[in-house]
């Protein structure tokens, strides 16, 4: 039997790995990557999502993209408009306020359940989230800071042991990212002020969690979410304009 030269053998051995690496992504993979792009602020509100371009980017057929967009639309991350296609959602002021209302209702019981289940590794994970968020804010990388802030809340949800409420919060965190992109004021203040506003509340919340004080942790969570909502800046309502009958009626 003729033996394959070592170089050719190495190439042959690498082929299965390359094939696996280039395998078509699952629908869940596509969904997860699009959600990550929203959370990382790489997909901004109003961005048009062209199905053909997405299919090419993911290396799949267009028929694979459509169900993912429908799923994202059901979660209010994407807006599907007949004859116009899909765009990243642009939440209204009412939708933004509803999201924060739902988060206040959901996160108090989640943090209480987290306290009942949390282990040392969970406390360490939350500490890392805060430390990394502080570093991102200090560097002026507000997109990453917002993502890490969401990770802090999501870790609490994931380790709470309540799958249904955790699923609700995952959707709310994605929608919160869109809301912060659309309505957060310009981050022109000093980075240490931003850190104080954003991270000290997480540190206070973590301190209550470490003390296993569910009541105080729920209070701090509610206060934290209310402050985030209070910082949003909504554009003034547009004037509907003059009544056309008043404007043109009787003109001669």
Image (cartoon, helix red, strand yellow):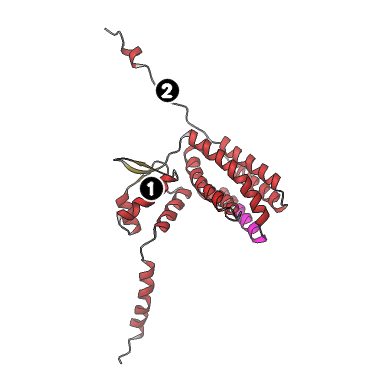
Q: Which of 199/68 is in front?
A: 68
* Residue 131 higher or lower than 48, as above or below: below
Indicate yes or no whether the magenta region holds residue 208.
no
In percent of the image, x 42 and y 48: which residue is there?
Answer: 72
State the image coordinates of residue 18 (x, y, percent, origin top left): 37, 71
> On the image, numbered disc 2 is attached to which residue?
239
Q: Nearer the viewer, mark 1 or mark 2?
A: 1
User: Dot 1, crowdedness within 10 Å: few (<14), some or many (≥20)?
Assistant: some
Mark 1 residue element: helix
**Total residue callouts:** 2
The local secondary structure at tag 2 comes to loop
Q: Is residue 213 above or below residue 82?
A: below
Residue 107 pos. (x, y %): 60, 45
**Where does the magenta region start and end?**
119-132
C-alpha separation, residue under disc 1 versus residue under disc 2 = 34 Å
Say whether residue 66 is left or right of residue 149: left
Query: Residue 150, percent across and down?
Result: 55, 49
Quadrant assignment for the N terminus: bottom left
> Mark 1 or mark 2, which has the lower sequence index?
1
Q: Is residue 24 above or below residue 218?
A: below
Name the side, left or right, on which 101 lies relative to 238.
right
Determine crowd level at label 2: few under 14, some 14-19, many 20+ residues with C-alpha closer than 10 A: few
Main structural element of the magenta stretch: helix, strand or loop?
Answer: helix
Q: Nearer the viewer, residue 202 or 98?
A: 98
Is residue 123 highlighted in magenta?
yes
Residue 28 in view, yes or no: yes
Q: Is residue 188 visible?
A: no
Left or right, residue 251 beside residue 144 = left
Query: Mark 1 highlights which residue?
Result: 70
Q: Residue furthest left?
A: 252
Locate residue 241, reporting x and y percent: 38, 20
Up/down of 27 relative to 108, above or below: below
């Amino acid at each position: 039997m003729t033996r394959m030269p070592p170089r050719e053998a190495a190439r042959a051995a690498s082929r299965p790995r390359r094939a696996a690496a280039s395998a078509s992504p699952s629908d869940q993979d596509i969904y997860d990557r699009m959600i990550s792009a929203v959370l990382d602020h790489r997909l901004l509100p109003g961005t048009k999502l062209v199905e053909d371009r997405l299919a090419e980017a993911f290396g799949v057929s267009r028929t694979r993209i459509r169900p993912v967009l429908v799923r994202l639309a059901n979660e209010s991350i994407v807006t599907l408009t007949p004859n116009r296609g899909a765009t990243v959602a642009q939440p209204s002021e009412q939708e933004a306020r509803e999201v924060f209302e739902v988060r206040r209702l959901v996160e108090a019981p989640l943090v209480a359940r987290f306290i009942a289940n949390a282990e040392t590794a969970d406390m360490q994970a939350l500490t890392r989230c805060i430390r990394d968020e502080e570093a991102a804010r200090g560097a002026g990388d507000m997109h990453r800071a917002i993502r890490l802030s969401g990770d802090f809340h999501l870790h609490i949800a994931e380790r709470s042991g309540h799958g249904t409420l955790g699923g609700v919060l995952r959707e709310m965190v994605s929608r919160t990212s869109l809301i912060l992109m659309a309505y957060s004021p310009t981050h022109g203040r000093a980075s240490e002020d931003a850190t104080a506003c954003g991270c000290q509340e997480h540190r206070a919340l973590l301190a209550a969690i470490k003390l296993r004080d569910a009541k105080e942790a729920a209070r701090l969570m509610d206060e934290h979410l209310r402050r985030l909502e209070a910082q949003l800046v909504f554009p003034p309502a547009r004037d509907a304009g003059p009544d056309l009958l008043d404007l043109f009626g009787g003109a001669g």
